[in-house]
Image (cartoon, helix red, strand yellow):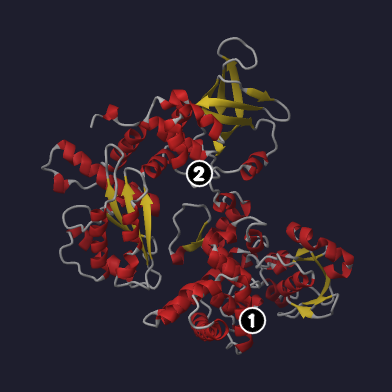
Amino acid sequence: MNDSALPNTMRFVRNYLTHTYRPWIDLSDVAPRSPQERDIVLLSRALAAQAVSMLTDCSPQEAAASVVDGPGDSGIDAIAFSKGGSDIWLVQAKWSDKGRARLGEKDAAVLVTGLQRLADQRYEGFNSRIRASIHRINEALSSPRCRVHLVAALAGDARLAPQVERQLALVGEGFGFAGRVPVTVHTLGLADFHSAARADAGPSPVSLSATLTDGWHRIDVPYQAYSASVSADELASWYNTHGDRLFDSALRPYSTGRPDPAALSRLLTAPEEFWYFSNGITMLCDRIEASFLARRAAGQPLLLRLHNARVTNGATVVATVAQAVDQHPATGNLALVPVRIICLEGAPEDFASALTRAGETEGSADPLDFVALDAFQQALRDEFADELHKEYVYKRGAVAPAPDAGCTMQEAAVALACAHPDVSLTARASADPAYLWRPAPEGAYTRLFGGRPSARQIWQCVLLLRQVRTALAYAAAGGPPRVRDLAEHGDLLIAHLVFRSIDPDLLEELSQSADGLEDWTAQRTWEIADLVASAVERLFGQHLFLASVFTDERQIHVLADDVTRSLTAPPTLFTHESSGAGRRPNSVTTLVDHARIPDGTRVMYRPSPTEERAIGEWLSEDPRRYLATWTNDPRRPLIWEIDQQAYSPSALVRHIWSEAAWHEAPSAVQGARSWVVPGEGTLADLAEALIPATGNGGA
């Protein structure tokens, strides 16, 4: 196809794929073909490799090595593995010079057949490239943590036909590893490949020109801003030139979105009306240079030069306009887009972040976009890396690490919800997982992360939840349908009850290598699962749809209370004295072992700003509520002034929250950082000064 006839997006993606992957893609099997045919094969294989690169964060050379396209590929164009080896990515790519690639029913059927053959370990007929990966495929499929990702990489619209969606949705049910290995279907379209290619252009600041011709308005106090309209053609040119660098770095590339079908249709059919129906875009910049194009007067044509410009709200509008102009260039001159331009020169440092948080995102907002703006999540990522040598992923769209290599914010939120004293969080999470990371009052994000849990606390909760799920999967394998349903729908309640079985202070001290931890968790999980199954049948009947119980807050409370009354005391997990080398040093233990604080020393509770807002008034009603006395007891060193009972630092914080009836209290506590020796520092500070390598104290 003549390159000049390609739409801008297609031309950019084609050039990017050719330039990036031509040195690495093996074309030896198509050498006798014409140059045009070889180019089509190159682009198809490069598209598959780019999908692998985007999903696994590997280099173009590594991605190209994953390509298995050719005779005997059974519909699989690339096979890739996560760094830990437990995730398998199987890619089928479809290239179209016109940007109209689709995954048909026949394509899907061939791919499903290929997957079935892999699952059944029937490798005869596969080509040499696939056979070279057989050992890694078998190794991954035998892992209890294996996940299979089926990817449709399309040089066209990412949407699948309904019949193809239904065909792929049933993939997991027909596999030899059905019921044990989850299979997830992903689609990547032209917009995704265009965004990724643009993102590779580099993070340099964007400078662009905006032409204001139709009734613009300027504001100077307190910060310079313009309210105006720009032509669709100009907006599309910004995106075609700068790609995803046009979007705010806090949200890029996770909220750039795809074109909105309804808005696209309206823009193409009635471009003159688009301004009336669109919310437009909001842009920030560091500096503005303005010059009149004709007469110097308010409302006359004005050219703005925007330095370090970025869109903070309206990514879907940008994508919609860019696609419309690509499809019908005449639309660019007929449609206007509302735009608000805000200059940050002279504004406070946190002004840009506040604007991004406050902006209403177009379409349906994803709460993960707001989580990405929370500085605490970035701090957690750094803490995971520095202290645990693990990955912590919190931005939407980022590839999850291999299980042994770390976790995502979503998995952490679910684990913290299971560890929270309020069992209703498990019901809310089962009904709508996004509830856990929505900001208050619509969600539980503050309850889970507001107490600033440490990386070690989160990682331990994640490990325990994984062990519960592994034990349930083992019990469900080969079991009756009722057991499988319980493992699928009741896993969060069962995990919550396992967490209840562990002293919270001990939980904070466990490590992945604690002796007997996995065996203890498995035995406790099976015991609790049996009790839950019996209680469900006794309380709600044997024919009830189980999912309805585990998503109902009232029923989940009744069920949890009933099972708790039936639970026996758990077997001993470990004792304080036999913690071994696997357990991290504990602040209280360190202070007691070094006799750092004399008996009888007065310590004070220092609430965080969140705690102060929630219970500060209650604390001030009786100042003794802030006070405790230190004793050199390695388990319960604090004597609370109010009741003269002994507590660990974390347990006393939780007790104070309970006494104050703080129902929205966080799930995690860093007790050693909540108690202060006046004039000297927190318990954690004093412990860290004794042994610098101790890290965050948690007890």
Q: Give the side of residue 642 with respect to residue 302, left or right.
A: right
Q: Position of residue 458 (x, y in %)?
A: 58, 66
Question: Mark 2 or mark 1: which comes first in sequence?
Answer: 2
Q: Give the side of residue 183 with respect to residue 675, left or right.
A: left
2 and 1 marks in contact (CB < 8 Å): no
Between disc 2 and disc 1, the foreground one is: 1
Q: Position of residue 495 (x, y in %)?
A: 55, 75
For mark 2, does the 10 Å Cα neighbourhood hold few (<14), some (14 to 19), or many (20 or more) residues?
A: many
User: Residue at 45% across / 30% down in the picture?
Assistant: 270
Residue 392 shows up from this direction = yes
Q: Quadrant of the N terminus?
A: top left
Mark 1 is on which residue type? Answer: Asp
- In the image, 64 versus 104, the foreground residue is 104
Q: Give the side of residue 181 with respect to residue 262, left or right.
A: left
| SS category of the residue bearing label 1 | helix
Residue 6: image quadrant is top left
Residue 470 shows up from this direction = no
Mark drawn on residue 140: none
Above or below, comparing residue 249 to residue 545 in the picture: above
User: Residue at 32% across / 49% down in the picture?
Assistant: 153
Q: Position of residue 513 (x, y in %)?
A: 51, 76
The outermost residue toward the left is 32
What residue is shown with label 1? 561
Separation of disc 2 and disc 1 at Cα?
A: 45 Å
Residue 40: image quadrant is top left
Q: Position of residue 667 (x, y in %)?
A: 65, 68
User: Residue at 26% across / 54% down in the picture?
Assistant: 105
- In the image, 243 versus 661, the foreground residue is 661
Mark drawn on residue 252: 2
Q: Give the side of residue 561 with respect to residue 150, left or right.
A: right
Mark 2 is on which residue type? Answer: Arg
| SS category of the residue bearing label 2 | loop
